[in-house]
Image (cartoon, rainbow, N blue to C red):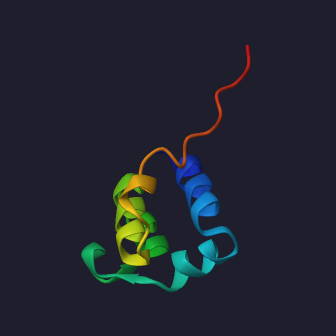
Amino acid sequence: MRAREFRHAVEAEFAGRGDALLHDLVLGELAGRTAREALDAGVPAQEVWLALCRAAGVPPERWHGVGLLEPRER
């Protein structure tokens, strides 16, 4: 998952509260860091996304694919 896909996934899943979750929600499985702190420390976006989903109670069926951007038309 690329950074752009991560941002898209956060916006798609959490809408207006995504930014607050990234900065305020402490993720125990990421050494007690917020998603933003984990990303800044070099934790892969996919790992941060999954930790964020688990902590926020996102159903597993929505964990994959939400950040994928629409394919470009040729």
Instruction: Using the image, determine if residue 11 lies above or below residue 70.
Output: below
In which quadrant of the rendered image does the N terminus lie? Answer: top left
Q: Is residue 35 left or right of residue 18?
A: left
Q: Residue at x 59, y 48 (%)?
A: 4
One can see residue 72 in this view: yes
Q: Along the line of sight, which residue is nearer the eye, 14 or 39?
A: 14
Which image quadrant for residue 37?
Answer: bottom left
Coordinates of residue 39 in the picture (x, y in percent): 44, 64
One can see residue 42 in this view: no
Q: Is residue 19 left or right of residue 25?
A: right
Instruction: Using the image, determine if residue 64 lies above or below residue 59.
Output: above
Coordinates of residue 6 in the picture (x, y in percent): 53, 54
Instruction: Using the image, determine if residue 68 lies above or below residue 57.
Output: above
Which image quadrant for residue 14?
Answer: bottom right
Q: Residue at x 44, y 76 (%)?
A: 56
Q: Along the line of sight, which residue is nearer the eye, 30 or 14?
A: 14
Q: Is residue 62 left or right of residue 10?
A: left
Coordinates of residue 41 in the picture (x, y in percent): 38, 67
In which quadrant of the rendered image does the C terminus lie? Answer: top right
Q: Residue at x 35, y 70 (%)?
A: 54
Q: Along the line of sight, which residue is nearer the eye, 22 or 63?
A: 63
In the picture as drawn, the residue positioned furthest to the right comes out as 73
- How many numbered marks are there? 0
Instruction: Using the image, determine if residue 22 lies above or below residue 70.
Output: below
In the picture as drawn, the residue positioned furthest to the top comes out as 74
